[in-house]
Amino acid sequence: LGHDIHFHDKKIALLEAGPRKEYDHMPDSYSNRVSSISPGSATLLSSFGAWDHVCSLRLKPFRRMQVWDACSEAMIVFEKDDLDDMGYIVENDVIMSALTKQLDAVADRVEVFYRSRAVGYTWPLPSHSCDTSPWVQIELADGRRLQTKLLIGADGHNSVVRREAGIKNIEHQYDQSAVVATLHLSEATDNNVAWQRFLPTGPIALLPLSDTASSLVWSTSHEHASELLAMDEESFVDSINSAFWSNINHSDFIDTAGAMFRSAISLLKPSGTAVRQLPPSVAEVDPESRAMFPLGMGHATEYVQHRVALIGDAAHRVHPLAGQGVNLGFGDIACLAHHLSAAAFNGSDLGSLKHLLKFETERQRHNVSLIAATDLLKRLYSTRLAPLVLLRTWGLQATNALPPVKVRI
Amino acid sequence: QLSLFRLAAKRPFSTSHSSVDSEEIKKFQLLAHKWWDEEGEYSALHSMNDIRVPFIRDTLMSMSDNYHLGNPLSGVKILDVGCGGGLLSEPLARLGASVTGIDPLEDNIRTADRHKSFDPVLAKRIQYKSSSLEEIVEESMETFDVIVASEVVEHVADLETFIKCCSQVLKPEGSLFITTINRTQLSYVLGIVVAEKIMGIVPEGTHEWEKFVPPEELEHLLESNGFSVKTVNGMLYNPLWGSWSWMESTSLNYAVHAVKSGAQGQSGLTDAPAEMDIQQHSATAGTAG
């Protein structure tokens, strides 16, 4: 918003709980918190000059994504026909640094309060003829007071803004935690493929960082996650390799049924089946890089209220299996910025519900279906039961064979 | 009643014709505090901002050589006649203009003043005065770049006097923007019967059909008083969505843009009024249909 021309004489304050993060060059080791950035999100970041900084620090584009089942041979491959990148794996610190640089560029309009925390909010009363200020009042931990026409809550899935505004949240804790780590591959490779395998305990994904390193995101039960963190490095590496390579969960029945379906498809659509490639094997894990965090899903019943808007995880929280969490947030940002920019150009009061509701409708329509689909996939893939495995096997194979459906994803 | 008395006493050069109609004043007195409830009695006026602000903004931008997209009306002095609670004054001021808002009803001015007082930027850019148009003519000859009279001329007692006064306080080549309602069978059915009595879009009794102004009459009055009418465009209110849009026909609501001629004494060149192209600036929000 600070870079938007229609915001030329507006003032924006950003309250950030963490410290200022800016890097001129990245340390040799990779951070274990990474995000998969979609091309749409990259476009948003480049619209105000942040993407250039990301590129100058480091990122890894990937061209292909292979997703397959542990209980069958079914798999789906996403690939762009032209030589465009499908997406980018970027460390979160890199994105933060790029954003910090671009915030500095508009420091006359955007003031960032690092290491700050809001402790109290005073909401405007709905009555329109009262004498108290119609703006939102915010009290900071250090005693300073701010007032604003529009408060945007971007404070994560435990959003305080959401809670204080009285917006109800539908949430559900998954019985899973995600284990992240930075891994080193056995041998250098092009490494431009993202791999994800659905195990009955949860999906395990390998996201490329460089020719020799990849990032691990393994969603599994809380107990298993703790075990993974506790075991020695060699056992950890072995678990990863066997998770990707072993066929222990296959059953003959499923294999035969799957093979039958595959031959049927290859009759109808010869190009509809693809060869399953094997992911690279892992040699070692970066010490200190193992971490885990619990997973859940959430969706706020409202994204907006008079003078309040929620974006990102404060509005919705998804399972990492689709790698979409941060991209949904970027989508929220692009949409809200568009509506606020138009409102500013119309001279409107920025906190007015009229344009905030347009943002809410647009994003809820988009987000709800994706969140529901992600949740459904998570549940569908959490079982070994034959009928469901068959369903998802055939479903995956069919989806892989049908270009229109794949393109939409 | 007290405010009417003050008005009468303040008029030193009172003519027998005045543009302020005392009956009209009484109607608005009751609703003076309801202006800023976006869902209330004035909701249709709030949503009218979605088309009248871009109309004024884009017209002025197209007439100017240099403007800044972040502050498109910077340096422009605007007079908002019949400003009410300041519904239109505030967005225009946010876009950079210096706005003077006048309204004969003191309660309206009080509401407008209080509402702008919470915003330091608006408080500086807007001045409100409880006054009729004639009363400020003496001290404001050729002062303003733009006059906006939105939803006002259908309440005015003497339209010709009103237009003459507009001409006096407007700089040469200055712009006059008017939005009002046409006097047709359709506007009686939809504008009075449906809008007031049935659907309650406008509080009952707000409008008198006999005072609605046909665009031909308005154009004639403007042209014979030193204005050149540039644009006439019809407006339509959709009660389902509560939103306004432009329409070809002027049989209901319409908007006019006229320019005061530059040379003294010239009685306006008669340009054929053109249908307006809706200008699409890259960041303009589309109005909900």
Image (spheres, coloured by chain):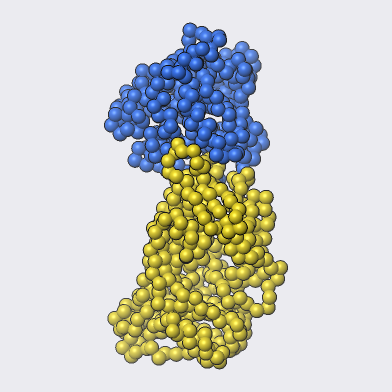
Name the foreground residue: A107 vs B111.
Answer: B111
Which chain shows up in yellow?
A
Name the foreground residue: A345 vs A273.
Answer: A345
Residue ranking furthest to the front: A143
Q: Is residue B129 visible?
A: yes
| Residue B270 placement: quadrant | top right
**x, y percentage for residue A295?**
45, 73
Chain B palette colour: blue
**x, y percentage for residue A113?**
63, 57
| Residue B116 placement: quadrant | top right
Name the foreground residue: A155 vs A101.
Answer: A155
Q: Is residue A346 left or right of residue B72?
A: left
**x, y percentage for residue A170?**
38, 63
Name the foreground residue: B26 vs B94.
Answer: B26
**Depicted A218 relative to depicted B225: above or below:** below
Residue drawn at x 55%, y 9% is B13
Residue drawn at x 55%, y 36% is B117
**x, y percentage for residue B243?**
40, 39
Q: Is residue A272 visible?
A: no
Q: Is residue B142 left or right of residue B217?
A: right
Q: How many marks?
A: 0
Residue drawn at x 42%, y 81% is A221
**Depicted B53 relative to depicted A162: above or below:** above
**Depicted B126 relative to depicted A29: above or below:** above
